[in-house]
Image (spheres, helix red, strand yellow):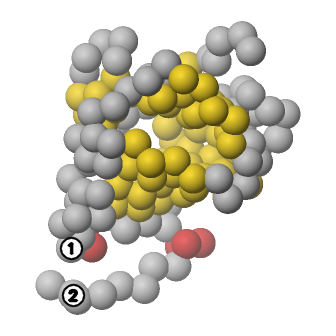
Amino acid sequence: METHHVLRFDELPWLDRGPGVRSKPVVKRGHGSEHLTTGVSEFTPGAAIALHWHNCDESVVVLEGEATAEVEGRTYALAAQDTTFVRAGVPHRFLNRSDRPLRFMWIYAAGQVTRTFADTGQTFDHGSAGDRAVVTPGPG
């Protein structure tokens, strides 16, 4: 197995996550990573992902735009360079309530990442066909 990789962002594919959301995995298990998964997601204005949690710790860094993070029932306004850290098993989600595109980088502390959706209890491998729970954000 390779000991390292140079990944060209423009050469990596985007994954459609549902209306208004797409993600680009960068470092993943396929590269031999056992303890790290990274990538970038983009949300169009008004887009949101459903409340969920992961099997591992997660950090998100806002690259462009403004995000709303909901973590354990609390809401946080985030701007470029703001960063979140959410422990494994903690319910959270991200929304774009602005009128501009949102782009952020995600970093998971595992090579095998799952997402469990709060409303259904269903668990999917991160980036799989079932991992597409995009919702319309609520008021405010």
What residue is pinned by disc 1? 32
Q: Identify the amino acid type marked 1.
A: Gly
Q: Where is residue 21 in the image (x, y as percent from the top left)?
A: 59, 38
Q: Which residue is drawn at the image coordinates 40% and 42% (left, top)?
A: 86
What residue is pinned by disc 2? 2
The label shown at residue 3 is none
Quarter occupied by the C terminus: top right
In the rendered image, the vertical position of residue 20 relative to residue 103, given as above or below: above
Outermost left residue: 1
Outermost bottom residue: 3
Q: In which quarter of the image is residue 130?
A: top left
Q: Where is residue 102 in the image (x, y as percent from the top left)?
A: 70, 45
Q: Quadrant of residue 20?
A: top right
Whichever of labels 2 and 1 marks the residue nearer the N terminus, that label is 2
Q: What element carries label 1?
A: loop
Q: Which of 127 and 11 is in front in this view?
A: 127
Q: Where is residue 3 in the image (x, y as percent from the top left)?
A: 23, 89
Q: Identify the amino acid type marked 2.
A: Glu
Q: In this view, does 62 lie to the left or right of 97?
A: left
Q: Quadrant of residue 4?
A: bottom left
Cα separation, mark 2 vs mark 1, equals 7 Å
Q: Which residue is drawn at the image coordinates 49% and 19% (left, top)?
A: 73
In the rendered image, the vertical position of residue 15 relative to residue 118, given as above or below: below
Quarter occupied by the N terminus: bottom left
Q: Where is residue 22 in the image (x, y as percent from the top left)?
A: 56, 44
